[in-house]
Amino acid sequence: MIPTVEPVLTRKLRRKQEVVTENLCGNELVPYHLGTTSGSESSVMVDRARNLVQYVVVRGDLVRTLGWPLGAVIAQSCHAATAVIHLNYSDPDTQEYLAELDTMHKVVLEAPNEATLTALSEILQDNGVAHKLWVEQPENFPTCLALKPYPKEMVHSHLRKFKLFK
């Protein structure tokens, strides 16, 4: 019988997965692996209880129906995300999110059209959810919105019906 040789990379990934699974079951802290630096792996402990996330919702019709270049749509998302961070810079969640620069978590969702995007903005406003509706100027054309960083459980219910942007 020929012994199977597991590739080194696969073994390392399996060990990382076991460590993460073990810590998720037993502790609030789990390792976050930063990758390699000069051949050595570094990691930090991240408090998963906070689970801060920044949501960005982009109009899908900009690419599919209106023929916008993907780069232009990505730029709109960047504008919205930067603007909402600027507007909420002193917010404790924003400061915590920015302090963990290498572990930021963003989720980019898709709104099918302008009406859906502006309706979401109104719902968020009515519920006191800090966000920035990005309106391209001088056309006065809403393209996307971004929420300030929040714990996922605080805002997920407002975004549940939106799918990942593809």
Image (cartoon, rainbow, N blue to C red):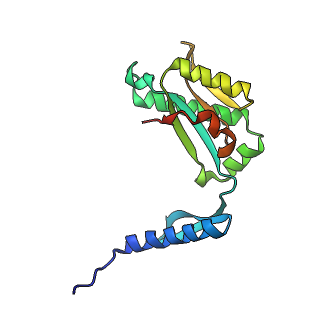
Residue 101 position, x and y percent, is 62, 51
Residue 8 position, x and y percent, is 37, 75
* 82 lies above or below 152: above
- Of 159 and 86, the residue lying toward us: 159
* 103 lies above or below 9: above
Whether residue 17 can be seen here: yes
Residue at the image point whose x is 47% and y is 24% from the top: 112
Say left or right for 70 vs 95: left
Whether residue 151 can be seen here: no
* 92 lies above or below 118: below
Say left or right for 4 vs 35: left
Can you name the residue that lies furthest to the bottom here?
Answer: 1
What is the count of numbered marks? 0
- Of 63 and 28, the residue lying toward us: 28
Quarter holding residue 155: top right
- Of 63 and 136, the residue lying toward us: 63
Quarter holding residue 89: top right
Residue at the image point whose x is 44% and y is 22% from the top: 62
* 107 lies above or below 136: below
Residue 137 position, x and y percent, is 57, 16
